[in-house]
Image (tube, rainbow, N blue to C red):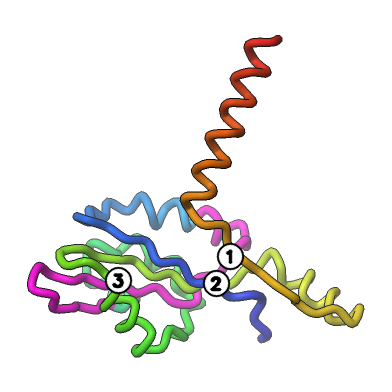
Amino acid sequence: MRLGPLEYTVIGFDKPTFDGSIAEEIGKVVEKRIIRLVDVVFVEKDAAGAVTIVEIDNVRDPRFAKFAPLLKDRMGFLPPEDVLALAEGLPADSAALILLFEHRWAEHIKVAIAEAGGFLVARETIAPEALEMLNAEVEAIEELEEAEA
């Protein structure tokens, strides 16, 4: 098996309450074969700065039970030292969910690009702050268009 493009996302929480809704939404894109979860890790940092790392394949933890059906392709590729480095960057008394996933939608595109002699030059993710500003601009334009209609 050849993997498509991989990406990791770190979602921070002040006081995490896992009710299964995050897993359900991720499950929707996994079922549609848009992404494949390659690794999922939960990291918690207490008020004193002590770090706890939980591999989400530990489905005995009820907080993560809804992730179980999404982890059949889990490969555990997140290096422990990278997880620890991410954990150390968390503020005290917070937590994070680290998702490493494959962009399955791009598998065939990647092959077509390679077969055409192409290669990736750059790839960036737009910062959440910039995306928030862009969303505000789009909403303002939509409101203006609705007012003009």
- To which quarter of the image does residue 13 belong? bottom left
The residue beneath circle 3 is 42
Instruction: Please name the residue shown 70% across and 72% down the image.
Output: 122
Q: Return the x and y of residue 49 as percentages of the image width and height.
A: 13, 75
Residue 32 position, x and y percent, is: 61, 57
Percent of width and height locating residue 57:
34, 76
- In front: label 1 or label 2: 2
In space, the residues marked 1 and 3 are separated at their CA atoms by 19 Å
Q: Closer to the observer: label 3 or label 2?
A: 2
Marks 3/2 in contact by CB < 8 Å: the verdict is no
Who comes first in sequence, dot 1 or dot 3?
1
Residue in the foreground of this view, choosing between 142 and 104? 142
Q: Residues within 10 Å of mark 3 (few under 14, many from 20)?
A: many
Disc 2 marks which residue? 7
Please report the bounds of the magenta region as a residue range: 28-54
Which residue: 41% across, 88% down?
Answer: 79
Type of amino acid at the residue the image marks with label 1: Ile
Q: Dot 1, how many residues are within 10 Å of its Cα: few (below 14), some (14-19), or many (20+)?
A: many
| Residue on which the image places disc 1 | 35
The answer to whether residue 56 is left or right of residue 69 is: left
The secondary structure type at the circle numbered 1 is strand
User: Quadrant location of residue 96?
Assistant: bottom left
The tag on residue 4 is: none
- The earlier-in-sequence mark between 1 and 2 is 2
Q: Quadrant of residue 36?
A: bottom right
User: Tag 2: residue type?
Assistant: Glu
